[in-house]
Image (cartoon, coloured by chain):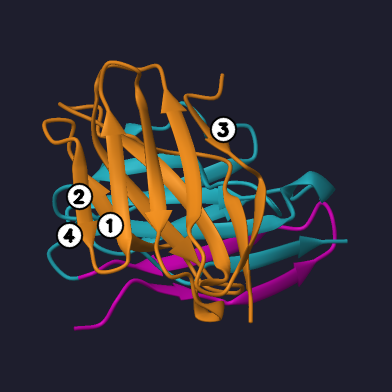
Amino acid sequence: EAGVVQSPRYKIIEKKQPVAFWCNPISGHNTLYWYRQNLGQGPELLIRYENEEAVDDSQLPKDRFSAERLKGVDSTLKIQPAELGDSAVYLCASSLDTEAFFGQGTRLTVV
Amino acid sequence: QQQVKQSPQSLIVQKGGISIINCAYENTAFDYFPWYQQFPGKGPALLIAIRPDVSEKKEGRFTISFNKSAKQFSLHIMDSQPGDSATYFCAALERGSARQLTFGSGTQLTVLP
């Protein structure tokens, strides 16, 4: 069974440019998470979906970040415009119940 | 507000030794406590998990000890191996509709050969 797939693996952009990350969760998993992980720190939740509904986006900086999960399957996370402080690893995870499975993440570098 | 506090930040252990990582929480709505292992360039992977109705869970060389009254739990790695060198995160999941998985700050474990 394929795990959580994220793309791209790496992205380098100039500040003020837009960037998008894509996540394909494990088939059948109704819960999808986007986390941000800064160097040397634990993942911090950005948004959680139950099927296509965003049920927890309180930590998402809504002035520049947006996310969608069309048809309750794949999801995209967008940043526009990116700032230097957005440099981090963006992790996607999915779960059916308690166990969350993570993708390898997208390492974003904003220069 | 850091809901799950993890210590130590880094840990160096000799091969064959015992590695111990501690976590504490405040939110009594947490009802599932997983530990994740993360290697460089990889996403976190579930290692072992426990629910608060048991005080200990063992899987191979990995054991979780859970103290509900103290709101603390710990990971013990017996007979630590160089291949165990990674970053370990404790986490906690809220019951009910919240279902937010909150992570500790991580412990970088180095097992010396």
| Eye-nearest disc, 2 or 1 | 2
User: In the image, residue B6 lies at what x, y percent?
Assistant: 54, 36
Residue A101 visible: no
Quadrant location of residue A11? bottom right
Chain A: colour as depicted: cyan
Q: Secondary structure at mark 3?
A: loop
Q: Quadrant of the C terminus of chain B?
A: bottom right
Instruction: Please report the residue visible at 81 percent of the width from the left and 51 percent of the height from the top.
Output: A16
Identify which amino acid the numbered label 3 is placed on: Lys
Amino acid identity at mark 1: Ile
Q: Are marks 2 and 1 on the same chain?
A: yes
Please indicate whether residue A82 sits to the left or right of residue A111 in the image.
left
Element carrying mark 4: loop
Amino acid type shown at disc 2: Lys
Give me the disc on residue A62.
Answer: 3
Magenta residues?
A1-26
Instruction: For marks 4 and 3, give the one nearer the viewer.
Output: 4
